[in-house]
Amino acid sequence: MQSLRELRQVSSAENEFAQMRFVVLSGPSGSGKTTIVPLLIQTCPVRLIKSVSATTRAPRPHEVPGEDYHFLSREEFARRRAAGQFLECAEVHSSGNWYGTLKSEVTRARDVGGCALLEIDVQGARQVIEQCPQALTIFVRTPEGEYERRLRARGTESEKVIQSRLETARRELAQAPAYRYQVVNDDLGRAVAEMSQLIQQWERECDD
Ligand code: 5GP
C-alpha cells in the first residue's frame, strides 16, 4: 500500500488540490450527518470550515444564500462547471438537481489556515477520492435496520416511498468501503468524538 507521502507525490503533478487538506463526510439520509457537521466544527481541535455547496435547487424558507448554499440557476451552474470551477459535482438523482463543491470553497478554508469540511453525496465523494487520495473521507452510517425503523415509525411516508428511500440508502451504503473510515452513528456524542479523533490523527499523518 502506498504511503500518504507517495500518494501526494503521484497526484500533485496533475492536481493542484492533491496537496490540500480537507475532510469529506457522506452518509445516507437519516444517518445524522447534518447534525454531526456543526458539532464537529464546534468540538474538533482541528479548525474545520464548512464548505458551502452550490446547488440548482430552490432555497427552502429558512435557508440563507451564501450560508446554507450558493443557489445558482441551472445555466450558471453549467457555466461554472464548464469553466472547471468545481472540485466535484453531481446530479442528485432523488431531486434531479445539481450539487457541487466550488474549488474556491476549499481554497478559502486553506487561506485562513483551516481545513474545509465537505458534506456531499456518494457520487461527489467518488470524484474526490479519485482526484485527491489524501483527503480524509468518512462515511456515516446508522446501526443496521435503524433507518427503516425510523422511517416506519414516522408513519408519514407511503410504502412505495419507503421502499424507494431504502433502495437509495442501500445504493449509498454499497459505496461505504471506498471511504477511508466508516463511523456508526449509534450515539451522537460518541460518533462526533470518534470523528474528531480520526481528523486529528489524519492531520498528524499529513504532517509526517
Ligand atoms: P438537500 O437538498 O437536502 O440539502 O441535499 C440533498 C443531497 O445533496 C444530500 O445528500 C447532500 O449530501 C447532497 N449534497 C449537498 N451538497 C453537495 C455537494 O456539494 N456535492 C454533492 N455531490 N452532493 C451534495
Image: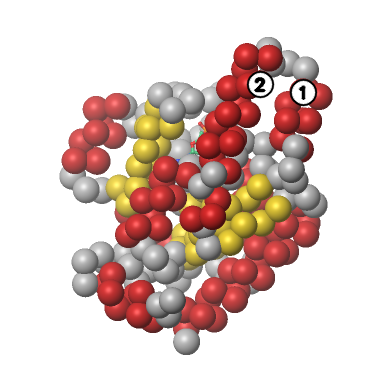
Name the residue type under label 1. Arg
How crowded is the residue under tag 2: few (<14 C-alpha within 10 Å), some, or many (20+)? Answer: some
Q: Residue at x 70, y 58 (%)?
A: 192
Q: Residue at x 39, y 65 (%)?
A: 133
Foreground residue, 109 or 6?
Answer: 6
Q: Residue at x 41, y 50 (%)?
A: 126
Would residue 18 be found to the left or right of residue 193 on screen?
left
Q: Which residue is mark 1?
A: 152
Please say if the residues under marks 2 and 1 sit with CB atoms less than 8 Å apart.
Answer: yes
Residue 9: x and y, percent?
A: 30, 78
Would residue 142 be found to the left or right of residue 4 on screen?
right
Residue 21: x and y, percent?
A: 43, 68
Which residue extends farthest left? Answer: 83
Q: Secondary structure at mark 1?
A: helix
Q: Which residue is mark 2?
A: 162
User: Does the beta carbon at disc 2 come under 8 Å from ligand 1?
Assistant: no
